Image (spheres, rainbow, N blue to C red):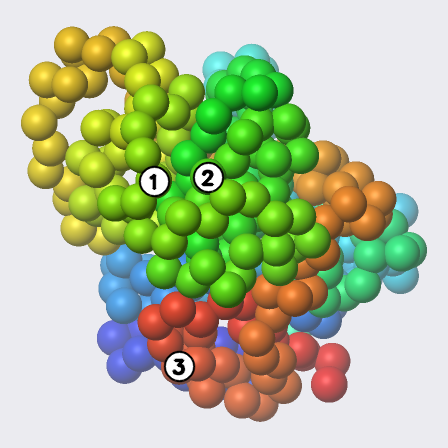
Amino acid sequence: MRALTIDARGVRLRDDVPAPTAVVGEVRVRVTHVGLCSTDLALARGYMDFRGVPGHEFVGVALECALAGRRVVGEINAACGHCAACVAGGDRHCAERTVLGILGRPGALAEVLSLPERNLREVPANVSDASAVFTEPLAAAFAIGESVALVPGERALVLGDGKLGLLCAHVLARAGLAVTLAGRHPERNGLTGLRVDHVGPLERAGRGYDLAVDASGDPDALPALLARVRPRGTIVLKTTSERPTTLDLAPLVVDEIRLVGSRCGRFEPALEALASGSLAVEPLIVARYPFARVEEAFDHAARPGTLKVVVELDS
Ligand SMILES: [Zn+2]
Ligand SMILES: [Zn+2]
């Protein structure tokens, strides 16, 4: 089948990649749309020494089992189901897990992918394919509320007005927090259908926030955010970076600041939000490419300041 692969030679569309075979408990999905995200670009640059088929933000049509013929999206962590973490309900932290297009499992930039049946969710009829590719990053934004109590009226600072930062700002504002967004693109304020206080660069953001969220992908963000939360405030890190961060931890101790890492989220709240029409995600799409031009799509997505690039496998 056709699939995009990453190897030592870089990113290549090939037509000789073996299609996934039937696996008990898994469902094969014919992929129709894939969103490219910063993780895919990092993998292409060599992050995690990735080799194989990337892509994890997808919508497609299930080919078998109860969901056959239905439009589906899929949670990307495939857990073993029986280790201590899985039994405790923390399957996203299963040590045996594979992660679609990221760790030990071929990804969505292929004609067909395979995921455990329990990972798949049917897409509500009123959610477009282009919107459905945002389920995974939107779920990651909602995941903030799994780790931190979102208290209406509290002041939140979101650093980064890229795709994830805009979604995080939206989710926090919907939860009733007073959101300040810092980044280089004030013109993006309101793209998701809800305006927040966009202050431009972080230097203009002020101090004393109850909650700060780093969605910048910048290893130097954390030291800068430490100075902006109040004593006993919370910082949530939403992005990984390829370069390590150097920082003075003394303020963390003196001000008793809570530092929380946050990765993937459950799909249900994201699908509900998309179906309710309470946020717009299609305005975040800046380009759509047919699968034949997926390499070009990668180059486009890698240009600094690019919002979402979507690859259409069915066009
Ligand atoms: Zn992603
Ligand atoms: Zn497990």
Position of 71 compared to 144: left or right?
right
Q: Which residue is mark 1?
A: 205
Residue 214, visible in the rendered structure? yes
Q: Which residue is mark 3?
A: 299
- The earlier-in-sequence mark between 2 and 3 is 2
The residue shown at (47%, 25%) is 155
Give the SS element for disc 2: strand
Between tags 3 and 1, which lies in front?
A: 1
User: Residue 79, located in which quarter of the rendered image?
Assistant: top right
Above or below residue 150? Residue 270 is below
Of 14 and 307, nearer the camera is 307
Q: Which residue is mark 2?
A: 180
- The x, y position of residue 43, in whole percent, is 34, 62
Q: Cβ–Cβ below 8 Å for labels 2 and 3? A: no
Quadrant location of the C terminus? bottom right
Mark 2 packing: few (<14 Cα in 10 Å), some, or many (20+)?
many
Give the SS element for disc 3: helix
Q: Cβ–Cβ below 8 Å for labels 1 and 2? A: yes
Compute the Cα span from label 1 to label 2.
7 Å
Residue 25, visible in the rendered structure? no
Q: Tag 3: residue type?
A: Asp
Mark 3 packing: few (<14 Cα in 10 Å), some, or many (20+)?
few
Q: Tag 1: residue type?
A: Ala
The residue shown at (30%, 45%) is 204
- The earlier-in-sequence mark between 3 and 1 is 1
Q: Tag 2: residue type?
A: Thr
Above or below residue 146? Residue 102 is below
Between tags 2 and 3, which lies in front?
A: 2
- The x, y position of residue 310, in whole percent, is 60, 72
Give the SS element for disc 1: loop
